């Protein structure tokens, strides 16, 4: 047997079962070898029958003193009931397929059983336990692995298959440098594999799991370092003089915050450094990321280079375009706008001005990455709300110039540890301070009894000339889900909030319809916008001072925070109301955090602890490889060690050309697939 052999070489796996396994990503013996248990059952300690507790799994032994059928014994599904006795008591053991099971038990013989204990008519009972004759070599005692469920394959079958793989352990050689193995006190890979599948005590499982988690995170980090090295070492970037931005800064009607200044210093160093900038700027809604980006665009324009800013929606692109034109026109800097629904003649004019260099800054949607978009001298690429774009879209945009500088902005706060993983190819700057004078949004929890008072308050704000958002989790009313729908709310609020205009927007509408509704709200013609989460990343409406979130228990923390960020953009005090129908612990924790703080980074940390990274981000959405055994939150301490080890290896051998790093290189290639270019 070899690691790369098909699993069909194993006894018991034919074509049909191989297809089932393939559906779970298991095609080779190596794939099956690295299919690890999700937990273990400790069956080392026998429990006397009188001490068995209903609701718990247990190992017990006893003598079969009675066998009886509950019906016709000639029917295969007739239940069989055994009475099993030890020195302390009697328990019923029930098997529903009695006809097949009965012949496996002999009267007055001893057997071991393992299963969930229950109670029926004050008598202890165990239904369908695993069992063996006492003294059988294949007894069920010990620490047994429990694998993730595979349709149609029993745990017993999975354990037997893993037994067949034991001879392969010797093929798995040590692939890490001796210094790293010693420094981080790692078990050998063969030992780790054997004791993950067949441990004899808990310490073996812990040391084995630590080694395998370390391996996986090391490969992940090494791959990300490799991408970063490849981006920075092999890309002589456009050099932009950051000094002229000081003139732009002097003209601002406000002082930059400490966070903005720190981010600008990072960007300045990158622009002047000679290597193409690849930087992520994280900052909460309203933290002033755009101003920092404007300083970079100003510096680029004064250095003779063009900039492009890509936004996720047409209306957001238009809003950015209008804002940049207002800020840059006094300095003689020309701003152009490009989006899909433009008239052909307008588009041709913009493309011609871009090609000739008349346009200094282009703002647009995905339209800016189309093949007919040609820049005269692109030096700076900016993407806004990066989590709405794929990695490939960013690459297409950077290919419009000769290694332009890249600045990525996101208002989605991500804990720094996770940001390093999700954006491993980027340097990271965080803006954690808010501009002076910005009033924190007041967040209040309301149950259904207080709901009417919430909308009375909304009406007061409307009378004062303000606007409001109302968000629902559903588009249409549902029989299966007890939650307000956007359509239901729209009908209710049109009547409740008369004479103020109310509009409805949701994801099922056509894009031009959504844009028209959003534009009406942005212009102030619509006073109340009833919506689903389609407004999560929306537009800047400083006059909107109230956000009402119906059925807040149906939203995650990060989502609630993003929705709340739609208000609080003007000088007036803003408010957020969470209307919740749930009293669950998770819902209460979310509500408490939202009412306590407006700090997006604190909320992101809490969300990470409550839900984990997979649920929040979705690994594939960010181009992050799938992890099989490690967890970025629970194994953060191992992640730090793996990161240090990966950095040490890549510092000594940036291109992983040394023979000692061939296995690491191979593992990186397998983990990242098409996301990475590695010569093997």
Image (cartoon, rainbow, N blue to C red):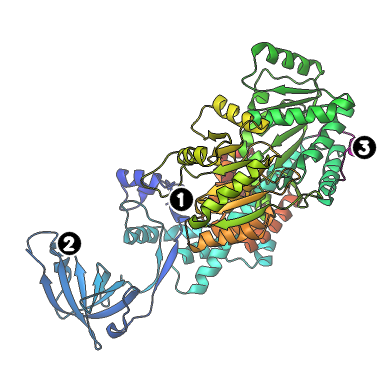
- Give the residue pinned by disc 1: 31
* Residue interval drawn in magenta: 236-255
Q: Nearer the viewer, residue 589 or 96?
A: 589
Q: Residue at x 48, y 60 (%)?
A: 169
Tell me residue 673's x, y (percent).
57, 40
Which of disc 1 and disc 2 is earlier in sequence? Answer: 1
Tell me residue 61's x, y (percent).
27, 80
Please tell me how crowded label 3 is: few (under 14), some (14-19), or many (20+) other residues with Cα within 10 Å: some
* Left or right for 654, reference 515: right
- Give the residue pinned by disc 2: 97
Which of the two discs, 3 and 1, sits closer to the camera?
A: 3
* Left or right for 19, reference 203: left
Tell me residue 189's x, y (percent).
55, 61
Residue found at the far bottom of this picture: 87
**Membership of 246 in magenta stretch:** yes
Q: Residue at x 81, y 33 (%)?
A: 237
- Give the residue pinned by disc 3: 243
């Amino acid at each position: 047997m070899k690691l790369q052999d098909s699993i069909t070489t194993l006894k018991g796996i034919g074509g049909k079962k191989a297809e089932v396994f393939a559906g779970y990503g298991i095609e080779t013996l190596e794939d099956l070898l690295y299919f690890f248990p999700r937990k273990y059952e400790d069956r080392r300690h026998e429990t006397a029958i009188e001490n068995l507790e209903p609701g718990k799994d247990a190992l017990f032994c006893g003598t079969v003193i009675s066998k009886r059928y509950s019906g016709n014994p000639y029917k295969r599904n007739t239940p069989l009931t055994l009475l099993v006795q030890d020195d302390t008591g009697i328990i019923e053991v029930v098997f529903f397929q009695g006809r097949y099971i009965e012949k496996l038990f002999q009267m007055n013989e001893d057997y071991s059983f393992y299963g969930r204990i229950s109670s029926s008519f004050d008598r202890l009972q165990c239904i369908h336990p695993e069992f063996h004759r006492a003294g059988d070599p294949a007894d069920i005692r010990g620490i047994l692995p429990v694998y993730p469920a595979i349709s149609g394959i029993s745990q017993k079958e999975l354990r037997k298959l893993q037994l067949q793989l034991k001879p392969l352990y010797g093929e798995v050689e040590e692939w890490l440098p001796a210094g790293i193995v010693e420094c981080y006190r790692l078990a050998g890979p063969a030992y780790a594999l054997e004791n993950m599948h067949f441990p004899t005590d808990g310490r073996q499982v812990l040391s084995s799991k630590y080694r395998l988690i370390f391996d996986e995170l090391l490969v992940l980090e090494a791959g990300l370092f490799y991408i970063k090295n490849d981006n920075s070492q092999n890309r002589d970037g456009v050099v932009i003089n950051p000094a002229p931005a000081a003139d732009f800064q002097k003209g601002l009607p406000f002082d930059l915050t400490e966070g903005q200044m720190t981010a600008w210093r990072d960007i300045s160093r990158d622009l002047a450094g000679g290597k193409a900038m690849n930087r992520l700027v994280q900052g909460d809604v309203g933290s002033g990321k755009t101003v920092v980006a404007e300083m970079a665009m100003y510096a680029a324009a004064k250095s003779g280079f063009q900039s492009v800013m890509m936004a996720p929606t047409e209306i957001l692109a238009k809003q950015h375009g209008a804002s940049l034109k207002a800020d840059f026109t006094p300095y003689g800097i020309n701003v152009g706008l490009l989006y899909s629904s433009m008239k052909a003649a307008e588009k041709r004019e913009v493309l011609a001005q871009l090609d000739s260099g008349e346009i200094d800054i282009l703002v647009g949607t995905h339209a800016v990455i189309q093949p007919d978009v040609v820049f005269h001298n692109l030096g700076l690429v900016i993407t806004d709300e990066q989590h709405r774009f794929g990695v490939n879209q960013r690459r297409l945009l950077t290919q419009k110039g000769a290694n332009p500088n890249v600045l990525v902005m996101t208002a989605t706060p991500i804990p720094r540890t996770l940001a390093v993983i999700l954006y491993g190819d980027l340097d990271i700057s965080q803006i954690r301070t808010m501009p002076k004078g910005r009033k924190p949004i007041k967040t209040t929890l309301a149950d259904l009894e207080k709901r009417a008072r919430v909308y009375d308050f909304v009406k007061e704000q409307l009378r004062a000339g303000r606007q409001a958002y109302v968000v629902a989790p559903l588009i249409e009313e549902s029989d299966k889900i007890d939650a307000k729908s956007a359509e239901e709310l729209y009908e209710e609020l049109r009547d409740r909030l008369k004479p103020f205009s109310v509009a409805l927007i949701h994801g099922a509408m056509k894009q031009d319809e959504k844009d028209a509704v959003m534009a009406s709200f942005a212009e102030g013609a619509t006073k109340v916008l009833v919506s689903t989460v389609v407004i999560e990343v929306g537009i800047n409406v400083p006059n909107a001072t109230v956000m009402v979130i119906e059925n807040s228990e149906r939203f995650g923390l990060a989502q609630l925070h993003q929705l709340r960020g739609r208000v609080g953009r003007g000088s007036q005090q803003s408010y957020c109301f969470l209307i919740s129908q749930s009293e669950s612990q998770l819902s209460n924790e979310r509500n408490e955090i939202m009412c306590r703080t407006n700090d997006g980074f604190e909320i992101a940390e809490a969300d990470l602890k409550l839900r984990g990274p997979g649920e929040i981000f979705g690994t594939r959405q960010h181009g992050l490889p799938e992890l099989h055994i490690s967890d970025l939150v629970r194994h953060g301490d191992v992640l730090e060690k793996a990161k240090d080890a990966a950095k040490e290896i890549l510092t000594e051998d940036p291109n992983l050309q040394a023979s000692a790093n061939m296995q690491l290189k191979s593992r990186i290639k397998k983990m990242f697939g098409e996301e990475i270019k590695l010569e093997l």
